Amino acid sequence: MKASQAQAGLASIPALLARNVEKHGNKPAYREKEFGIWQSWTWAQADVEIRAMAMGYMALGLNRGDYVAVIGRNRPQLYWAMAAAQMCGAIPVPLYQDAVAQEMAFVLDHCGARFVVCGDQEQVDKILEVESEWLTEDQKPSVEQIIYVDKRGMRKYDHARMNAMADVIAEGRAAHQRFEAELTARTAELDYNSTCVMLYTSGTTGKPKGVVLSNRNIIETSKNTSDFDHLRAGDEVLAYLPMAWVGDFIFSMGQAMWTGFCVNCPESAATMMTDLREIGPTYYFAPPRVFEGQLTNVMIRMEDSGRFKKWLFDKYMAVARRVGPDILDGNPVSAADKFSYWLGDILVYGPLKNTLGFSRVRVGYTAGEAIGPEIFSFYRSLGINLKQLYGQTEASVFITQQPDGQVRADTVGVPSPGVEVKIADNGEVFYRSPGTFESYYKNPESTASTKDPEGWVATGDAGFFEEGTGHLRIIDRAKDVGKMADGSLFAPKYVENKLKFYPAILEAVVFGASRDFCTAFINIDLNAVGNWAERNNIAYSSYQELSQHPRVLEMMKGHVSEVNESVAADPMLSGCQVHRFLILHKELDADDGEMTRTRKVRRKVVEDKFADLVGALYGGKSEIYTETEVTYEDGRKGAIKATLTLADAVVAPAQKVAAE
């Protein structure tokens, strides 16, 4: 713990809130778009709401050490709900709003949440379903109070243990004389060692684990990383990522409280892009999938545009790719190139950034998984200061970051301030820092296997430091990196990211460990491929039919062959070229267990679930009939049947180098 922070009394989120009220009281702290209109709250106004909410909790019986589950879309009231819980000495536990009741059941039972704060009727229904259908006879429902923000649809529910958030706040205001002193006492008890939040991992390899993060973890990380990128009170951030994800907690709670910048909540996922343009954030984070989707939409629009507009776009994007990153990093560029880029900014880059909502972005980050270098370079060529960071929930996000002027697509930067990183003999990356988690809740065995007595944490990723630059390069998940049958290196993520650069490819899963050659599953992007089909007069009635169309298959053959040429250029990884592939008849889906809620592929689950398809790819078949169980939006199960075509790809000649 840094004594200076603790001595200054800034040892908890409520303490930072109090400082912001004093320092930035009249500045906007939160905005939310509702019914098409932006609502705004200053720090002083937010503090009044949060304190009333906390006293309302106490009136309902919230005790020190209780767990408060928070479920719903990003909105100020849910961020306030977490801060209010902390004021009471309780521990907030945000859950993924798109999780089904069965997934919520594990978390609610595991943490024993007494209070649940729900965004709306849908989330309340899930809680009731958890209690009625998913808890066993040995498990007693721990939820004693359900609080909901949106009253729509809730009038006929049994309110014996349900309350509208507005009523809880009103009760807190009315009872302030009874609870003010107690609330002040509980808030004063909080220190750096107090638990700030418990966040559950995405469960890529098994059941999610509850990651206990202290005030020290969150505040020290927020301070160090805010200083690193010169974040300040005047910055604007768009809070649209899942509240249960550690990144959103650091950006929208930790860094927001530390710096005093404004957190903006969009109206819905459907209006997110419009809201992004209206806010024009200065500090922006998105996982690679979001940037891939935005690029796909840009390319679709360019294909649909007129001949002159398309020519103008292609001409000036060529200029941007050549000199844009150098101009952004302040490297020398000829006067002629500067003029061409300036003209391109007026005609193409500026309008494009405005359409994307990136006109004011001063610091942008992507993380969660590796981003394709071509995608990364596209945004930087436009003059957007997009950088990469490497992190995980157990680190309070930040392990490495890219400093301005040292941004490259193939590294994840240098250790973040206060973070130590080392590479084990087997290539696995280890770190320790003030942000290193306290423990896994109720799981001492996993805690001991992940964090050693000296505080070093095993990331599960394989990587190495570049000589000379000190930048970290991540190869892949350590468990996924292996060898082909001939001893050459197998790193599937490297190939998958190259495939996903193409707008038509939404997801890819590459297989090949201990085998003679690599194969791949491909998910088409229905938006991009559907648009292409319309332009080419190709009729289709479903995702499944379009995915198996002969012309779509030919398009994918071309993309895979181009990727193989690129992979062949890297002697270390040339053995990872895709020899055979198929286009899946369904999108990989978190509801079907094939992906996590943070959209990471559960590789082992996919391989086991579609073992017949993997076997067919390696068995030399040209087609295969398959039946797959799927989960519909309402939770019902069903099956889809399909006959899939298996295709050979063109493999480029390459020099293979055996992995050491």
Image (spheres, helix red, strand yellow):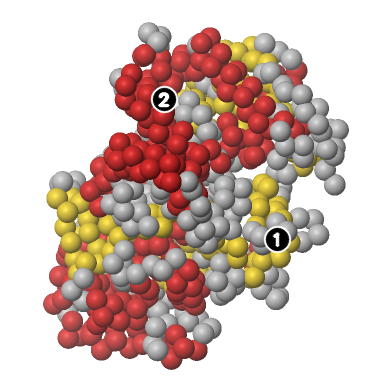
Residue 468, label in figure: 1
- Camera sees residue 64: no
Mark 2 residue type: Ala
Regarding mark 2 in the picture, which secondary structure is present there?
Answer: helix
Q: Please, is residue 613 above or below residue 319 in the view? A: above
- Tell me: 657 left or right of 458: right
Depth check, front residue: 112 or 596:
596
Mark 1 residue type: Gly
Please tell me how many numbered marks the rendered image carries.
2
Give me the residue at 22% from left, 55% from top. Answer: 32
Disc nearest the viewer among 2 and 1: 1
Give me the residue at 70% from left, 56% from top. Answer: 466
Regarding mark 1 in the picture, which secondary structure is present there?
Answer: loop
Depth check, front residue: 353 or 515:
353
- Tell me: 246 left or right of 43: right
Depth check, front residue: 282 or 514:
282
How crowded is the residue under tag 2: few (<14 C-alpha within 10 Å), some, or many (20+)? many
Residue position for label 2: 528
Q: Please, is residue 596 above or below residue 194 in the view? A: above
Residue 375, label in figure: none
How crowded is the residue under tag 1: few (<14 C-alpha within 10 Å), some, or many (20+)? few
- Tell me: 45 left or right of 586: left
- Give the percent coordinates (x, y) of residue 402: 54, 59
- Give the percent coordinates (x, y) of residue 510: 65, 32
Give me the residue at 68% from left, 32% from top. Answer: 567
